Image: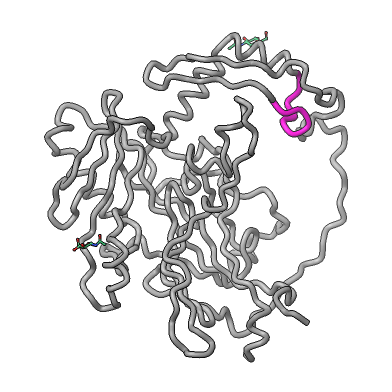
Amino acid sequence: MEKSSILRFTFIFAIIFFLFAYSFYPSSKSEFLGSSPCFPWCTSKNRIYSNFDSILENPVHKGTHHHHSTSLQPLDPLSVKEINKVRTILSSYAHFASSFPTIHSLVLDEPNKTQVLAWNKGDPLPPRKAFAIVLLNGQSHMLTVDLNLGQVINHAINSGSGYPALTMDDISAALKVTLADAEFNKSIISRGTPNFYMRPIEGLTVTVDLDQKKIVKFSNTGRGIPIPKSSNTDYRYTAQVKPPELKPLNPMSIEQPKGPSFIVEDGHVVKWSNWVFHLKADQRAGMVISRATVQDSESGELRSVMYKGFSSELFVSYMDPDEHWYFKTYLDGGEYGLGATSLSLVPLNDCPRYSYYMDGVFVTSDGKPFVQSNIICLFERYSGGILRSQ
Ligand SMILES: *[C@@H]1O[C@H](CO)[C@@H](O)[C@H](O)[C@H]1NC(C)=O
Ligand SMILES: *[C@@H]1O[C@H](CO)[C@@H](O)[C@H](O)[C@H]1NC(C)=O
């Protein structure tokens, strides 16, 4: 392929559908691995294919790296086996002898940049370590676990401000407490309709103490904000008189007769055209791209473009100092976790043929691993030559 035409392709990475699908996400009590907890919510809603037999016959590149018992690259996320090992180490840790803490975060403690950049394929990996943020008796602890040594090598208790990210159990508890509250109930009913988009629930914020499981602050200043009347705004299927009849679309396909031009090595290293980068799923950050390099078109050298990049760097605060808005952040990544709230992508519905799918290996609040399958897909898409100057 000639160089100029390569420019016409844009490499697209997608994590789609961040929904608060509490029902599919494991709480500490759920038995998760090996079951099919998502059904029927783990599929996206923009499906246009109805014949799933043909979808199943199509080739799908599937990442299975999380099943490897050893990691192959310094920045590879913790595997199922490593998460289980951390849990065993924490279970026998003296501080947690009487009760196991709630795990709010458990991720790879990445080797520092110097070590990562000095590492070459074939070298022994830098020591594998995990970093955990846990809550016990109202205190947050930060622990580093060395997987090779099999022990906790660093332990600090947070004495400053700040709290760990919410677990799904926290979120369900907050919902339960709020929905059972008579004042909240009254304020919602007085607002009217179920259509959140036409008639947003504005000016209503409830603060829940998750240790006490009770409402500590209730702010309802939304009265008098002009919003549309509730009549004829119920968008729910059951409220529709007659569903509109749409003419079905003819099938459409974009050919890649020789297959995709990218390859994925060691489960995480993506090579496409003159680009190389490491791609992984993270429970909090969602999708993480690390060590992105490009081969310089003049010197031929691999140049580092970005050491690490997150979706959260697209942070856009809503810029409204109002009490009900200032704490809301782009995609709510900090509160709930972009990876944690992502759903499995459906082949040929969400991502085209020849997509490469990657799973997330995440951790429940009791420290057990679970696999959220196909939450990243990787594919090439023709983008109509938007990068061309003429
Ligand atoms: C990176 O880690 C190595 C190994 O622990 C250590 O020797 C080195 O000083 C660290 N470098 C930086 C910049 O922190
Ligand atoms: C909310 O209000 C409705 C209507 O008055 C009532 O039927 C329901 O029991 C209330 N729920 C709670 C949790 O107070």
Q: Quadrant of residue 7?
A: bottom right
Looking at the picture, how far across and down is residue 219, in whole percent?
60, 16
Q: In which quarter of the image is ligand 2?
A: top right
Is 306 on the left-hand or right-hand side of 107?
right
Please tell me whether residue 109 is drawn above or below residue 259 in the rendered image. above
Q: Give the camera-side residue of 5 and 381.
A: 5
Residue 158 visible? The answer is: yes
- State the scheme by which the image is colored: one colour
Is 97 contained in the magenta span? no
Of residues 320 and 175, the one drawn nearer to the viewer in this rendering? 320
Examine the image and state in which quarter residue 110 appears: bottom left
Q: Locate residue 300, reporting x and y percent.
A: 47, 89
Residue 277: percent from the left, percent from the top? 45, 71
At x 42%, y 68%, the residue is 278
- Dividing the image into 4 quarters, which one contains the C terminus? bottom right
- Figure quadrant of residue 202: top right
In the rendered image, residue 3, in percent from the top left (x then y), is placed at 62, 89
For the image shown, how many numbered marks are present on the structure?
0
Q: Is residue 332 above or below residue 83?
A: above
Left or right, 52 with respect to 292, comes to right
Location of the N terminus by quadrant is: bottom right
Q: Main secondary structure of the magenta part?
A: loop
Residue at the spot 26% in from the left edge and 62% down from the top edge: 69
Magenta highlight range? 192-201
At a point 44% along the width and 86% down the height, the residue shown is 301
Q: Residue at x 46, y 50 (%)?
A: 285
